[in-house]
Amino acid sequence: MEKSQIEIEETITVGALASKLLIPVSKLITELMKNGVFATVNEKIDFETAQIIVDDLDLGVEIIQSKDIPNSSIEDQESKIKKSTLVNGKDRPPVVSIMGHVDHGKTSILDAIRSSNIVKTESGGITQHISAYQVEHSKRLITFLDTPGHEAFAAIREHGARLTDIVIIVVAADDGIKPQTLEAIRYAKKANAKIIVAINKIDKTGADINRVKQQLSEQGLVPEEWKGDTIICEVSAKTGEGINKLLDMILLVADVEDLKADEECPGTGLVIESHIEKGKGPVAKLLVQGGILRENDFIVTNSTYAKIKTLMNDKNEKIKTANPSTPVEVSGFKSLPEFGEVFKVANNEKMAKDIVNKYTKLNSVKTKNSINSNDLLRIINRNNKLTELNVIIKADVKGSLTSVIDSLRNLDTEEVAIRVVGSGVGQIVENDIQLATSSNSIIYGFNVLVPKSSELLAYRNNVNIRVFKVIYELIDDVKSEMSGLLKPEIVETERGSLKVLGIFKTTKDEIICGGEVISGSITSPMISKVYRDKSFIGIATLTGIKRGNISVDTVNKGEMCGINLALTSKINILEKDTIKFFTEETISRKI
C-alpha cells in the first residue's frame, strides 16, 4: 500500500505534528517519551526526530521536508549540482585554491600568474581575505581562489578548499612543511580535491627540494618521479620560473577530471565574501557553481536576498551573465549574506522573501534553544567570578569578521573570557560608540575606517577605539588586555631561617623571641612561617630585628639576634621551633 505524504518544515511543534497526523497529541507525546524525547505540546522537534516517530507509529504516512527552502549544506549543494551535470553537463573552467603556510608565497605565485601586484596591497604582505580571480592560459580559463595563511583564518581556508576542484599546496623550498601546510593538506583531502604541490622559492639560498619532497611523502603526497601520484611543480614566483608548467598541470588535471556543470538549471553557487560598499550598500562576492547568473535575477540565501543591480567580474567590469566557475561581485542585497552561504536564483521577489522568512523563524528557534561552549564556560565559572572583557568588533568583510570573532573566543580561559557585545561589517559609527559607552567595551576595528564624528564622540565618552590592518596584531592586543585582567601571581622565595633558642614576650598581637640564623639572611620586614619538627604551625610578619640592644635591618647565617613577630592569629612558638623567612614578588601573568 502506497503511503500518503505529509510535508513539514525543518522543525515543528508536537501539537502541530499530531494535528497533521490526525492522532491525539497524548499518543504522540507517549511515543516520543518511549524514544527518550520529553517534549510538551508546544515544544518543537526537528525533522529527523519527527521522521523516526512517524515510522514507529506505522500510520501509513510518510513525512517529507518542505521543498521551497534551499539546503544550505555545501555537501548537499555539491551533490545536487553533480547529479544535474550528469544530464546537462558542459565543460567548465577548473576552480583552484592556493593554500599553504603564511609567507610561503601563495599570493606571490598568483601575482606571477596574473602579472599584477596583489601582495603589496595586503597589510604586512599577508592575505587578509579570500579572493577569486580568473586567468586565461592556452586559450582556456582557470578560476583561482587565494585564501589567507594566518592561523586565525582557518574557517576561510577550509571554506576555500571545499569550493574547489584542485588545491595547490604551496611549500617554500627553504622552509619546508609547516603547521598550516599540514592543515591545508587535511582540508584538501577532506574536500576530495585533487592536489598539486608547488615548491616555491627554488631560487633562494638554502632551498632543499629533496627535503620538501621527503616531507610531502611522509604526508602521503608521494611525487610522481618517486613512483607516486602527486604532481610536484618547482617554481619561483620571483623569477616566474615554472609558472607556465604549473598552469599546464592544472589544465591536465582538469581534463582528467572532465569537469562539467549544468547551465540549464537555475543559477546557484556559494557566497565567498561580503562587505558594505559606499554607494552600493551590501555587496557579495559569489562563485557560480551551476546554471547561469544574469543581471536583474532574484537570488536568495538563507539570511537575505537580492535583485541583482550590478554584476561585476574579477576585473571590476560590468557583465550581463556569469557561467559556472565564474567569480562575480553582486550588489542589490537587502542585507549582508553570511560567509559560506549557498545562493540560488528565485523565480520572483515573493518567493525570495518567503524563503528568507522561513529560515529566519527556524534560526530563531535554534538560537533560543542553543548554548555554545563559551556560554557553558561562563555558566560553569559564574561562581568563580569569571572576568569578562567586553568588546565590539567591526570588520571590512563578513569572512574576516567571522575569523576575528572565532579567534578571540578561542582565547577564553577559566578566569578571563571575551564577551562580544556587538559586531558588524563596515566603518565604526556613532551607534557603536554609544553601545561601547553603555557596555564599557573596547571597540576593535579590522581594516575599517573611523569617521571624524565617531572619533569625536568616542573622545567625549572616553571610549577606546583600536583599528588594525593585520589580524595577528589585533589578537595580540586583545591578549594583552585579557592579561591585564588576570590576577597577578604571588611568588614566594625563601631567604633565610632561624632556630628559636628563647621566648622573651608573648601577647595577643606580638611575639618577641631570639635565636640563631641557620641559613641565608634575614631582613625586616619579611613574611615568617613557623615550623615544629617539619610541621607547619602558622604565619607571622617579621617587624624588627635586634642584635643586643641595637636595632638592625639584616642579620646573616651564624649570627644571634632577637626578633619581633606581628601576629594575625594565635601562634604558640616554643624553643627549638624553626622560623623560615620569605620575600614575596608580584608577577604579571599573560594569556
Image (tube, rainbow, N blue to C red):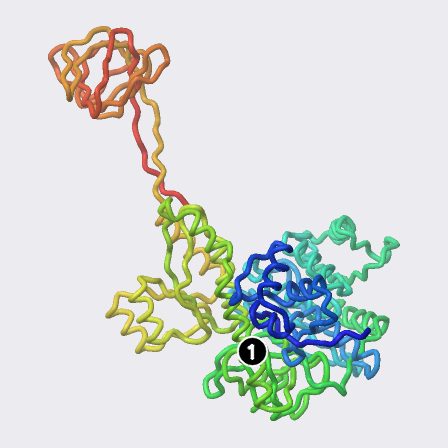
Residue 513, position as x, y percentages in the image:
19, 12
**Which residue lies most toward the left here?**
549
In the depicted view, which residue is nearer to us: 476 or 432?
432
In the depicted view, which residue is nearer to us: 20 or 575?
20
Q: Residue at point 61% right, 76% down? A: 271
Hey, what amino acid is under mark 1? Answer: Lys
* Number of on-image labels: 1
In the depicted view, which residue is nearer to us: 404 or 58?
58
In the depicted view, which residue is nearer to us: 151 or 383?
383
- Residue beneath label 1, please? 358
Measured along the vertical axis of the image, is residue 195 above or below residue 9? Answer: above
Q: Quadrant of residue 530?
A: top left
Q: Is residue 138 left or right of residue 126?
A: right
Q: Residue at point 70% right, 68% down? A: 75
Q: Is residue 590 left or right of residue 73?
A: left
Asked whether residue 107 appears in the rendered view, the answer is: no
Q: Is residue 537 left or right of residue 323?
A: left
Q: Quadrant of residue 17?
A: bottom right
Mark 1 is surrounded, within 10 Å at the Cα level, by few (under 14), some (14 to 19) or many (20 or more) other residues, namely: some
Residue 237, position as x, y percentages in the image:
68, 67
Q: Quadrant of the N terminus?
A: bottom right
Helix or strand or loop: what does disc 1 sit on? helix
Q: Quadrant of residue 556?
A: top left
Measured along the vertical axis of the image, is residue 418 above or below residue 259? Answer: above
